[in-house]
Amino acid sequence: MDVWEVSVLGIIQGLTEFLPVSSSGHLELGKAILGDDSLPKESLLLTVILHFATALSTVVIFRKDILEILRGLFSFRWNAETKFSLKIIISMIPAAFVGYYFESEMELLFGGNLLLVGFMLIVTALLLWLSDRAKATQKRVSYSNSFVIGVAQAIAIMPGISRSGATIATSVLLGNDKAKAARFSFLMVVPLILGKIAKDITGGEITLENADILIYGAGFLAAFVSGLFACTWMISIVKRSKLRYFSIYCFVVGVSAIIFTQVNG
């Protein structure tokens, strides 16, 4: 793939990582449309680089929050930052468990099963529609909420379910403030992404050997910049209760995928 094609994939990843439309599904669709003929390891390396870029954009957007959390943690006191960090850790448990013990089983779901993707997109659409109609509150995410949101994140590993959509919707349906729900959703995924990248690198699953720095750098930059835009935009969308539009989008795409599989089955 050339610089232009990888840049397009970077933009797709950057936008869909934060918008509730399933980034994994759109990234794979983009690869297929652009005729990605790279080897599995090369494709995995590109995916990891693009995910790292969006994780970094999250860090930039929430840099003040992250610095406050770190300062609070290193004060070694039972303060608000320590409590928030504990909630983040609790939220990571379900996805980490599934990723560690069922990684090979989950990979089997990404074999071009459009029927599954279609139904999961409809599930995402339903979650977004319900959360968009939820009443505004000032409630903060609790410890029990953190675990339930973490379960939603673990389920969102399935292709077609949006991670941000599932976690934000679940948090809002639990009665939490919409802006706080979005903030928690974006921050909770950063440790998981960085941990997955570290695991892939140390495990030898990916390597930068013979990698074209210019091409991958273009993809990284595209994903990072579009991620900055999408993250900021998504927070605004959640605050203004505009998730219904993404609900309609996911529903239309989901139904289209199901019809496509039946017609071509």
Image (tube, helix red, strand yellow):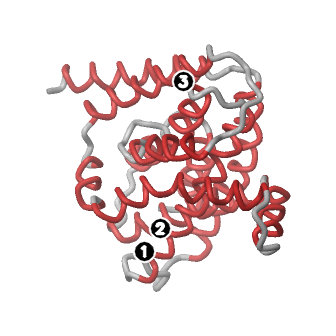
Q: Is residue 75 above or below residue 97?
A: below
Q: Is residue 126 left or right of residue 104?
A: right
- Quadrant of residue 64 in the image? bottom right
In this view, the residue in front, 65 or 49, is 65
Horizontal and vertical percent for residue 254? 38, 24
Horizontal and vertical percent for residue 72? 81, 66
In this view, the residue in front, 133 or 105, is 133
Q: Earlier in the sequence, mark 2 or mark 3?
A: 3
**Helix, strand or loop status at disc 1:** helix
Q: Is residue 33 visible?
A: no
In this view, the residue in front, 155 or 265, is 155
Q: Is residue 209 left or right of residue 242?
A: left
Q: How far is the residue under mark 2 from the one under mark 3? A: 27 Å
Q: Amino acid at mark 3?
A: Leu
Give the crowd class for mark 2: few <14, some 14-19, many >=20 residues within 10 Å. some
Q: Amino acid at mark 1?
A: Asp
Q: Amino acid at mark 2?
A: Lys
State the mark number for residue 128.
3
Horizontal and vertical percent for residue 248? 52, 17
Contact? badges 1 and 2 (CB < 8 Å): yes
In this view, the mark in front (3 or 1)? 3
Q: Which residue is mark 1?
A: 200
Number of residue marks: 3
State the mark number for residue 196.
2
Q: Is residue 62 visible?
A: yes
